[in-house]
Image (cartoon, rainbow, N blue to C red):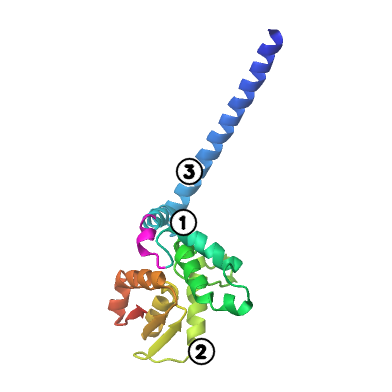
Amino acid sequence: DEILRDVGCIVLGQLKSHQEGITFASVGMVASISGVQLFTSADPLGRCVRFWKQLYSQNKKLTCDSSVNKGIDNYSNLHRGEGSDSSDGRNSQYKELVNTYYDLATVFYEWGWGTCFHFSYRFVQGGSIETFWEAIRRHEYQLVSFLQTTPGQKILDVGCGICGPMRNIARFTLCDVQGITINPYQVTRGNELNAKDPSLAASGVSCESV
């Protein structure tokens, strides 16, 4: 009996310690998220709400298959090259493979990375470092500066994703931007975001994905 009581006390002690650890971690996580939400422009709560809304409606917007689960199975089969015994056969399926991938992955890209699907390094100057979004915009502005455009011209964005860079470039150059992408889901989502951006009309520019 004494041994059982001792074992019980040890187990309960460990459970209590474990619960205290979980509570401390939960409080720390909530405090961290609240701090980021209140004192930065990251808006993690808003991004999570948008993510779940998009995820909920994703089945209705897929072009690769009738549901997310079937789309995942289809992508896995295409990636393994099932149904194709040669490299030429697999090459012929690349369009479907890429479209399926972006049907499934775009919502996660937008949630985790934002609307601009590219990398950029961050400058450090005078002891301060530019933000993620500042680095993204600077990279795009620097790139389009090589085109030496003038306001009112038209720019073509090939592989435009959901039009994040397109909108930044249109505001920066005061040019209309036309985007093309292989994935219909990205076309729909990009044009949704274009329509919701009042700064485009205020700048007198247009952005459209096809």
Q: Is residue 5 left or right of residue 23?
A: right
Residue 140 in the image: above or below residue 46 = below
* Whether residue 46 is situated above or below residue 207 in the rendered picture: above
Write down the residue under mark 3: 30
* Residue 127 visible in image: no
Looking at the rendered structure, the secondary structure element under dot 3 is helix
**Residue 23, image x and y in percent?**
53, 34
Q: For the stretch drawn in magenta, what is the main secondary structure? A: helix
Which is nearer the eye, 80 or 155?
Answer: 80
Q: How far apart are marks 3 and 1 (CA)?
A: 32 Å
Q: Do the residues labelled 2 and 1 touch (CB within 8 Å)?
A: no
Q: Residue 30: x percent and y percent?
A: 48, 43
Residue behind mark 2 = 146
Label 2 Cα neighbours within 10 Å, binned few <14 / some 14-19 / many ≥20: few
Lower sequence index among marks 2 and 1: 1
Q: In which quarter of the image is the N terminus?
A: top right
- In the image, residue 110 lies at what x, y percent? 45, 64
Going by the numbered disc 2, the residue's amino acid type is Phe
